[in-house]
Amino acid sequence: MKKLSFVLAAAGLISLAACNKPTDTANAANAADNAAVALDNAADSLNAASENVAASSNDTAVAAGNVAEAANAVSNASENVSNKM
């Protein structure tokens, strides 16, 4: 009787272990989901980076316009000084 109860207990534990073990299909699906999330995050990061570059380009264009206006102001001031002499 002792051996039979030991065998039944072992069979029960093996059954539980088999039920709780994730299948290879579940692991593959989980890995695919993780990869999809990682790709989505990478796409979001690239989108944010492109927006930052666009904003930086816009700031650069504004700065270039300001430099051009400053150069014109200096040129006009120089002409005013030359005309007064």
Image (cartoon, rainbow, N blue to C red):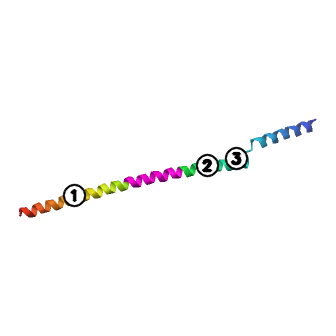
Tell me which segment is drawn in magenta: 41-55
> Residue 22 occupies which quadrant of the picture?
top right
Q: Who's the residue at 77% across and 41% down the image?
A: 19
**Residue at which label 3 appears:** 26
Amino acid at circle 3: Ala
Q: Position of residue 82 (x, y in %)?
A: 9, 64
**Residue at position x 78%, y 43% in the image:** 18
Q: Which residue is mark 2?
A: 34
- Which amino acid type is marked by label 2? Asn
Sequence-wise, which precedes: disc 3 or disc 1?
3
Indicate the secondary structure of the residue bearing disc 1. Answer: helix
Residue 55, compared with residue 78, is above or below; it is above
Amino acid under disc 1: Ala
Q: Mark 2 falls on what kind of element?
A: helix
Q: Where is residue 69 shown, x and y percent of the image?
A: 22, 57
Considering the whole magenta stretch, tell me its main secondary structure: helix
